[in-house]
Image (spheres, rainbow, N blue to C red):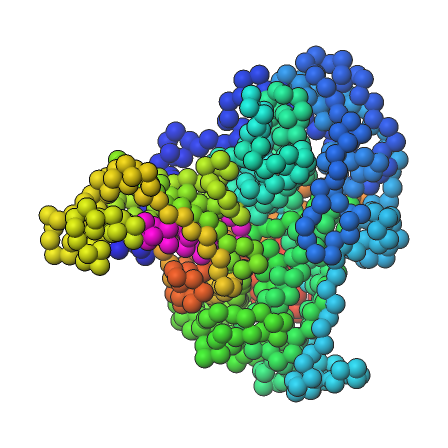
Amino acid sequence: MSILGNRVLRVEDPKLLTAGGTYVDDVELPGAVELCYVRSPHAHAGVVSIDTEAARRAPGVLDVLTAADLALAPIVQHLPGIPAEMARPFLAGDRVRFVGEAVAVVLAETRAEAADGAALVEVEYDPLPAVVALEHAASGETLLFPAAGSNVAARIAPAPAPSSAPGAAAPGAEGSIFDDCEVVVSERFVNQRLAPCPLEVRAAAAVLGEDGRLTHWSTSQTPFAVRQALAGALGVEEGKIRVIAPDVGGGFGAKNGDYPDELLVGVLAHRLGRPVRWCETRSESMLALGHGRAQQQTITLGGSRDGRLRAYRLEVVQDCGAYPLLASFLPHLTRAMASGTYDIERVEFESVSLVTTTAPVVAYRGAGRPEAAAAIERAVDRFAAEIGMDPAELRRRNLVGPQRFPFENPTGTVYDCGDYAAALERLLEASDYDSIRAEQAARRSCGETVELGIGLAVYVEITGAADLGGEWSAVEMLPDGTAVVRTGTSAHGQGHATAWSMLVSDALGIPIDAVRFVQSDTDLVARGVGTFGSRSLQTGGVAARQAAERVVELARELAGELLEADPADLVVDPGGGGIGVVGTPTARRSWAELAAAAAERGTPLRAEVDFTPPGGTFPFGAHLAVVEVDTETGGVRLVRLVAVDDAGRILNPLLADGQVHGGLAQGVAQALLEEFVYDAEGNPLTTTLADYLFVTAAELPSFESLRMETPTPRNPLGAKGIGESGTIGSTVAVQNAVVDALAGRGVRHLDMPLSPERVWQSLAATG
């Protein structure tokens, strides 16, 4: 009987819960040099001079290095359209562009001595105007990179609406996509800047072996990308570098990248010939680990008074921070999913990505897709309020029907499959939506000070996009009867060891504990892309399954020779016994015997597969939030969160529930609590976890999580990604609920986070 689809306990957890994990800072490196960075206290300034003499004389200090000492070329981002002048240096040279940017590095015998030495480095700065507001960045009044000529890192120009669309202007003619709309609503939204706050901060360690090969440990989601970046910085072949990502304590997308302060650890170990290590503090993590979201959006949505949506325009201004990393590309993902689950005839999108004197913005759980969902779902609620229609009914009338798939949305994205209406109806039934609306009306009629709000979101997102590449996996049977599965993905909490072991166990008919899982080591894994974008199961998981199936075919051929039987008559013994003749239990060869026989022939019982999907998959779902808002204090309490999520065929419901629950919590946190704030001078105001609030169990109700399964045709498992879906639907559902609670008091929109102060001020403004 197949174990696929069953709730199998995570095989990773016993070690993590007893002995504990092995993280980068746990790696033993006798005689290692400790590294500490000198970071800028200015958001924008010229670097006039750096005096390192006092630091060099400090106890235990071995060396102090600046950009001039390193003479390293800047890190080039391989993303389309980014000006070459905006490349990020390993250490700031003549200019710093955000508070926390490293200008020098101190190497010492101990971590404390390195920190003491860093405090003695004297840097003379020539302050320049900070550029925090996106309007200031767009004006070009102050340029972060004068050679680039502007603060624009990337731009997406609006594409004209198809001329065949009803009401669309002909090419070159005056007109608007909203010309035939009876009702048009417009609003400006802010999808605020977030700090990822992984439980494990970044760390790196490196040692140069006697053979001249560098071993580098990294808290990374993408070990092979780190190897490539290190090879480029050192000017050596990638084979001269081994990168290991041991247990990684959370990433959320922010640990997907080539940070200079991590790479420099490997560079210095290579130069010094001594082990080097670094672990950032929590405050450093808040300053220098890439931030998320940071989009300013202007929506315009038009349609008819009977609730037919016809035209939608989304204008995005993306804050890239000081250096255009992945943030410059995020609007492309927002554009791809701009119209969400709705059948809207005409959609226009344009964006500009700007550099500012703040921490660089990178991928954060969802990376561009939560921003798209937030924009369209808030827009739909605004339109519903404008025409006086229940927001559930407006959604019903405009969802893409199940018969339309594969469906190409107006921005050219082709959705694989889905049934959005079924997800919405299941949500409304499970939550008893009509009863909640009745309770809301009763409270309002009584004039209660605590208002009830209901928020909806029907979302779709893209996972496993084909242009992100495929994944490699290999499966090998050993003479002791166990199997080894190797994968190019790099899990950091998702449960890949459990999932991949299930796939191999099911194919080979062996116990799940007879499978050994290998990942995140570039010497033990041939190649890989990494884990991000909810891509792993539908790429690496498929490759592992196909490799296991090829091992079965090889074993049948071998067993056929040993048993003098036709391979077509041989099957896998589901009891773990190996390969045998159908209907003849005694005529078989165990996996141990087959692996030993293969080894004797010099051809291990092994297969490897590279799998690249033909296209992305599109998970979808519907979320409902119920909140209570105290109109006297502005306090918001989340009462219920009901989530219907469809990620195709589910391999392990336990793993899926874990991913959904984590995503729901992060979505609620953005809606109610989280925001990384800079003042007008570019000084960060939320650098500790006392200032930057994230959610705990105390703020969350028990989630009501329901599941649908619509298998995708785009991979053999029928699986879609599920790592980010919870975040995408829950955030705007909670935001819509708070606005809905206050709608009777004249509030039309509130930006996140929906703090008591913001809610109270909004109520005061409306009288």
Quarter placement of the N terminus: bottom left
Q: Quadrant of residue 748?
A: bottom right
- The C terminus lies in which quarter of the figure? bottom right
Q: Is residue 215 visible?
A: yes
Q: Is residue 384 left or right of residue 68?
A: left
Is residue 692 visible in the rendered image? The answer is no
Q: In the depicted view, which residue is nearer to us: 309 or 763?
A: 309
Residue closest to the eye, 687 or 52 = 52
State the extent of the magenta-drawn residues as a range: 531-552
Relative height, residue 559 to residue 348 (above, below)? above
Looking at the picture, how far across and down is residue 282, in whole percent?
61, 34
- Residue sitting at 64 percent across and 66 percent down? 335
- Residue 704, how many percent across, how many down? 41, 59
Seen in the picture, residue 122 relative to 401 is either above or below; the reply is above
Residue at 15% across, 56% down: 582
- Give coordinates of residue 646: x percent, y percent: 43, 64
Q: Within the magenta stretch, is there residue 537? A: yes
In the figure, is residue 623 to the left or right of 5? right
Residue 507 on the magenta span: no
> Which of the 4 image quarters holds residue 81?
bottom right
